[in-house]
Image: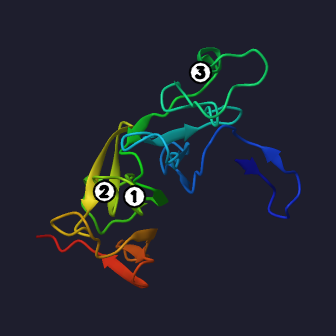
Amino acid sequence: MVRVKPDGTGQQIFAKGLRNTIGFAFHPQTRELYGFDHGIDWLGDTGQREEFNLIREGAHYGWPYVYENGKANPADEPPGDTTHAEYAKKTTFPVLTYDAHSAPMAMVFYTGNAFPEAYRNSAFVALHGSWNRKEPSGYKVVRVRFENGKPAAIEDFLTGFLTESKREQFGRVCGIAQHPDGSLLISDDDNGVLYRVAYTGK
């Protein structure tokens, strides 16, 4: 991840070892930067789990040599005489992990007033869904629940895009944004539609 000035100058590396951190945002209270990585596809149904990282300046998150909490990537050897275990000691591990191949595409922290207070400052993440897994993963929006400013758990928020047999899907969520009225807008790039999720108070 790189940082640049608004005019495009002053480019510098902010953090290394991230893999496809497509969705990332600053926590509204702590101003800490969080992001969701895409894992690789060729480690079976349960690997690599998607990583939810606290992204700090100067930190290294392991890719392409180690992943998750220090597991060795068999496809890439660390440089020089460094072993995977030695490289893992220099790696910053994720704060949470999630089902492999869920494909997190976008993330937003909720700052509105339309949802119950408990949802304030939660992160909402659009999971595009797997394509090569026996039991599909993703195909939904999840909430990253924070407690005392720290990520505590990942919970289902918007589901129902898979058939009961889980062999086909109704759609694939992709983008997510907060509307000025406090609702959430979620795009579906399989159907070319936009969903609005609002709280009715019931």
Q: Earlier in the sequence, mark 3 or mark 2?
A: 3
- Mark pair 2, 1: CA separation: 6 Å
Residue 184 x %, y %:
37, 71
Using residue 186 as the reference point, say whether residue 201 is left or right of it. left
Q: Image height check: is 94 above or below 134?
A: above
Residue drawn at x 27%, y 49% is 155
Badge 2 marks a residue whose secondary structure is: loop
Q: Which residue is mark 1?
A: 130
Task: Residue 114: name its quadrant.
Answer: bottom left
Quarter of the rendering occupied by the C terminus: bottom left
- Indicate the amino acid at tag 3: Ala
Disc number for residue 136: 2
Circles 2 and 1, Cβ within 8 Å, touching? The answer is yes
Residue 99 x %, y %:
35, 45
Residue drawn at x 66%, y 16% is 83
Graded by Cα atoms within 10 Å as few (under 14), some (14 to 19) or many (20 or more), the crowding at tag 1 reads many
- Indicate the amino acid at tag 2: Pro
Q: Is residue 176 visible?
A: no
